[in-house]
Image: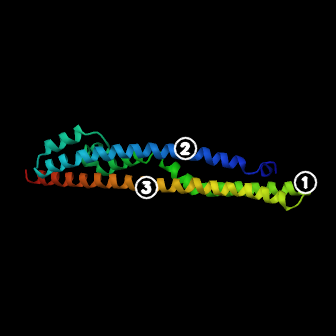
Amino acid sequence: MALALTGGGWVIWALILSSIGGVAVAYDRWNLLKEESKALASLRPVFLAALAAGDHDAADKAVKANPGAASRVLSEPENLEAALSDERRHLEGRLLWLGTLGNNAPFVGLFGTVLGVIKAFHDLAESGAGPEVVMAGLSEALVATAVGLLVAIPSVLAFNFLQKKLRDLLSETEALGQRYHAVRTSHARHR
């Protein structure tokens, strides 16, 4: 019963602290994916030109000269799926936080609202005053739901945006890897 009478104030603070963590994760992943996209953009034309020319040494050299996830994946053309899976785990790091925050913040806010309503009615029973006491408590309690939504919506937007960037990066890397594998296989058959 003691928890129910604390009201929803602490829930609001928990949501605010969680949202700070969410902003940190979004910023970190945004910067990482931006750097990975730049690395892929610089590798792609050189790598494709080497493949088009049938120059495997130049393709290998381009992979080794460029940093990033795409280069790490392409350095293992025989293990493309495993290398992609490893990079996905690395690049998705901490995105789970954003997804979880976006999905659960409204419920946490609602929990704060319920606690606030319980406290408001308890205060009414204790004071014996009129509905003004309940109305003040209810308005405070509803703030928790609003904060929950305010935290959830940007978290979900950031999560979806970053997941899309990640999918695009890995998809393009996989396509390069499949081209590389096809050219190497064709080259091996013609020997």
- Residue 150 coordinates in the image, percent (x, y): 59, 55
**Mark 3 residue type:** Phe
Circle 1 Cα neighbour tier, 10 Å, few/some/many (<14 / 14–19 / ≥20): few
Residue displayed at 19% across by 49% down = 45
From the viewer's perspective, tell me whether residue 15 is left or right of residue 117: left
Dot 2 corresponds to which residue? 21
Circle 3 Cα neighbour tier, 10 Å, few/some/many (<14 / 14–19 / ≥20): some
Circle 2 Cα neighbour tier, 10 Å, few/some/many (<14 / 14–19 / ≥20): some
Answer with mark 1 or mark 3, whichever residue precedes in sequence: 1
Answer with mark 3 or mark 2, whichever residue precedes in sequence: 2
Between 40 and 191, the residue placed more toward the observer is 40
**Mark 2 residue type:** Gly
Residue placed farthest to the front in the image?
132
From the viewer's perspective, tell me whether residue 68 is left or right of residue 90: left
From the viewer's perspective, tell me whether residue 32 is left or right of residue 106: left
- Residue 155 coordinates in the image, percent (x, y): 52, 53
Dot 1 corresponds to which residue? 127
Front disc: 1 or 2: 1
Q: CA distance from mark 1 to mark 2?
A: 40 Å
Dot 3 corresponds to which residue? 161
Residue placed farthest to the bottom in the image?
131
**Mark 1 residue type:** Ser
- In the image, which disc is placed on residue 155? none
Residue placed farthest to the left in the image?
191
Between 121 and 80, the residue placed more toward the observer is 121
Between 78 and 5, the residue placed more toward the observer is 5
Q: CA distance from mark 3 to mark 2?
A: 17 Å
Residue displayed at 42% across by 52% down = 162
